[in-house]
Amino acid sequence: MTEPLAVRLPGGSLVDHLVLGVPDTMAAADELAGTVGVRPTVSDIEGEHYPTRSGSIGLAGESFLELYGPNPTYAGPANFFHDLLVDLPEPRLLTFMVRVRDLGEAIDVLGLAGHRVEPMLDEWERTHAPSFRNAQFPDHALDPAVPRLIEWNDRLGMDERFVQGATLHQLKVSTPNHDVVADIHRILGIDGDDQLALVDGQAGLAAELDTPSGRIAIR
């Protein structure tokens, strides 16, 4: 039997991390602290040349929730992610990341099945973030039900940076393109998992997290 492209993390999750887009990372971290009971770790990477600022909270077993907001000191050229995040009216789950064994192999296998996948890293990330590589499905870039892929080259120190504050109970993935998305999930090996529910409907993500304060939902 062929080994799945997707990696099941320690603890059993197939979700490497959730990406929560926020208009203000610090404010979102404060709000999440009041909801979850622990405050996310906020990155100290700032500067006028980096367009975004992130925070993170561990979801157990190497999975995590990433807060992804604009860097208020950014002074570079127009940047898609910075402009998207600045204009968000409220926090919103943008996508989820699935860890793969070999990103090149995943791109090839999915391509042979008719699903175009392209690397995502920009020039800054190639220089400053060599610990991982990631990729997206450009034909489905705005469909949150289609995951982005990540291959970690070096996770040294990653988990120590995360405050462990919650566990992912379930991620509900909704899309009007059910058959296409279901095929992508099948090829990756993430279909049929109790933690990941794919349903027909308007495109969107809804996550249920078990926290010290009880079960909460984020969308």
Image: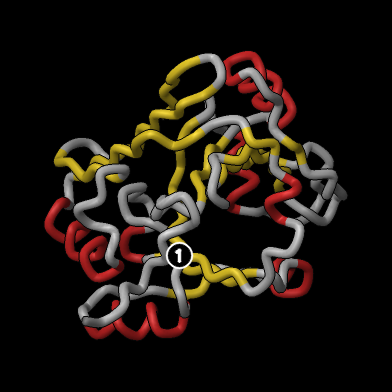
Total of numbered circles in the picture? 1
Given the current orientation, which residue lies at the most extreme front position? 11
Q: Image check: 213 left or right of 137?
A: right
Which residue is painted at 30% across and 82% down in the image? 109
Identify residue for label 1. 149
Quadrant the C terminus occupies: top left
Residue 14 position within the rendered picture, expressed as x and y whole percent measured from the top left: 39, 55
As rendered, which of 166 and 203 lies closer to the eye? Answer: 166
Label 1: element kind: strand
Q: Image check: 52 left or right of 186?
A: right
Residue 34 position within the rendered picture, expressed as x and y whole percent measured from the top left: 64, 14
Which residue is painted at 59% across and 49% down in the image? 81
Mark 1 surroundings: few (<14), some (14-19) or many (≥20) residues within 10 A? many
Residue 64 position within the rendered picture, expressed as x and y whole percent measured from the top left: 56, 44
As rendered, which of 210 and 123 lies closer to the eye? Answer: 210
Is 53 placed above or below 76 here? above
Which residue is painted at 35% across and 32% down in the image? 206
Location of residue 146 (image quadrant) = bottom left
Q: What's the amino acid at mark 1?
A: Leu
Residue 58 position within the rendered picture, expressed as x and y whole percent measured from the top left: 61, 40
As rendered, which of 177 and 78 lies closer to the eye? Answer: 177
Location of residue 200 (image quadrant) = top left
Is 102 placed above or below 154 here? below
Describe the colour scheme in one phrase.
secondary structure
Quadrant the N terminus occupies: bottom left
Q: Image check: 6 left or right of 189?
A: right
Which residue is painted at 66% across and 40% down in the image? 56
